[in-house]
Amino acid sequence: MIPRKLAATVQQRLQQFPAVALLGPRQVGKTTLAKALGKATESIYLDMENPEDLAKLNDARAYLLHNRGKLVILDEVQRLPNLFQILRGLIDEGIEQGHTKGQFLFLGSASIELLKQSSESLAGRIAHLELTPLGVKEVAPHELDTLWIRGGFPRSFLATDDEQSVIWRNSFIQTYLERDIPQLGPRIPAETLRRFWTMLAHLQGSPFNAASLAKSLAVDGKTVARYLDLMVDLLLVRRLQPYHASINKRLVKSPKTYLRDSGLLHTLLRLDNYDEILSHPISGASWEGFVIESLIRAAPMRTEASYYRTAAGAEIDLLLDLGGKNGIWAIEIKRSLAPKISKGFHSSLHDIQPAKAFILYSGQERYPKSEGIEAISLSELCALLNAL
């Protein structure tokens, strides 16, 4: 088992709140992490997809009262929305009796639904955390390319070889489309959703154009927007918003979309190994998405991420508004070992006036470029963000 960085944060939140919700896509390691945390204290684990565990909650109040004092881990809890009202009463009674910490740990794979249900019923009583696929700081430095190629889902990353990793990812995609998404409620044909997912893969890092996608899928723009909302909700796609500011220039206003896991991106595009990916036109956009996801994960909580692009084409790949004294960091992403700074990046820096500016590249040495811009590696920039 690879130690997860989030484990310490989950433990801290359980010391602060009666309930913690751990969100993340399926197969990302939520259950493994929760069970490992459960071993450190008296706990019970209930899976809402297991009929035997569901039967235990026929009289949920009586069962949970019987297990008062234990950490109760509820997996896929969004499947029982009526449970939250009962949980609120139990938590409030527990607080009155002095049980103010770590009563419940919820696991869920559909973020919006679980956030809505838990926030409405347990406001002020619950903390929300997201477990992502494996990140840069959770693998060895020499495994960075493997992480990019295979993605961060543990079974994909830890596969014995590339072929086994590809087999797992293909199976994951098929299962999500045919079983998991229909169970979450949306009635969308699996083939339609696969085509949409694949189209997003081909458009990695491009501004979202609902009309163009709607025409290709023979549906309307609202339906395409609903598909995107679903993929974002399932934590499979990131919608990177454009930067808005009072600047006397026309700015691109459409969000960019990125498949959050580079391994799934490569599988949807049928790119199975390092050589195939490097020789494909998507290589640069794939690396860009991988870097953006890594940096957003490394950044402090409440960081606002966006991109900047003018109608004339001047662009900054990623802006991280860190707040307070740290200000905005501007990041240009290059795969090259000898990165060059574009005129558009210089022009954009003049518009934004960030606190720091970096050109992130594939090398390891950190060195100054020009006008306050530093060349830096992904690992070192993640370390800088982690230290804030």
Image (cartoon, helix red, strand yellow):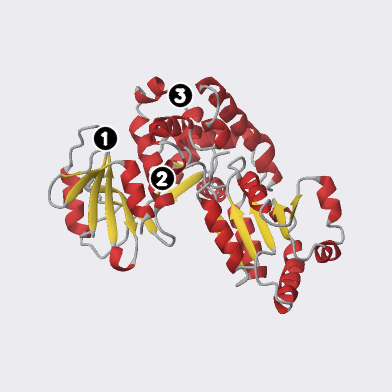
Q: Quadrant of residue 56?
A: bottom right
Mark 3 surroundings within 10 Å by alpha-carbon count, few (fewer than 14), some (14 through 19), many (20 or more): many
Q: Quadrant of the N terminus?
A: top right
Closest to the camera, between mark 2 and mark 1, is: 1
The disc, 2 or 3, on the residue closer to the chain's N-terminal end is: 3
Residue 380 in picture, x, y percent from top left:
31, 45
The type of residue carrying mark 2 is Ser
Residue at coordinates 23% horizontally, 60% vertically from top-left? 355
Q: Which residue is mark 2?
A: 294
Instruction: Give the total number of marks visible in the rendering.
Output: 3
Residue at coordinates 50% horizontally, 37% vertically from top-left? 152
The type of residue carrying mark 3 is Leu
Residue 19 left/right relative to 57: left
The disc, 1 or 3, on the residue closer to the chain's N-terminal end is: 3
Q: Which residue is mark 1?
A: 363
Q: Which residue is mark 3?
A: 271
The disc, 2 or 1, on the residue closer to the chain's N-terminal end is: 2
- Alpha carbon distance from label 1 to label 3: 24 Å
Residue 87 visible in rendering: yes
Residue 104 in picture, x, y percent from top left:
69, 61
> Could you say which is closer to the camera, residue 125 or residue 331?
125
Residue 180 in picture, x, y percent from top left:
67, 41
Mark 1 surroundings within 10 Å by alpha-carbon count, few (fewer than 14), some (14 through 19), many (20 or more): some
- Alpha carbon distance from label 2 to label 1: 16 Å
Q: Quadrant of residue 187?
A: top right
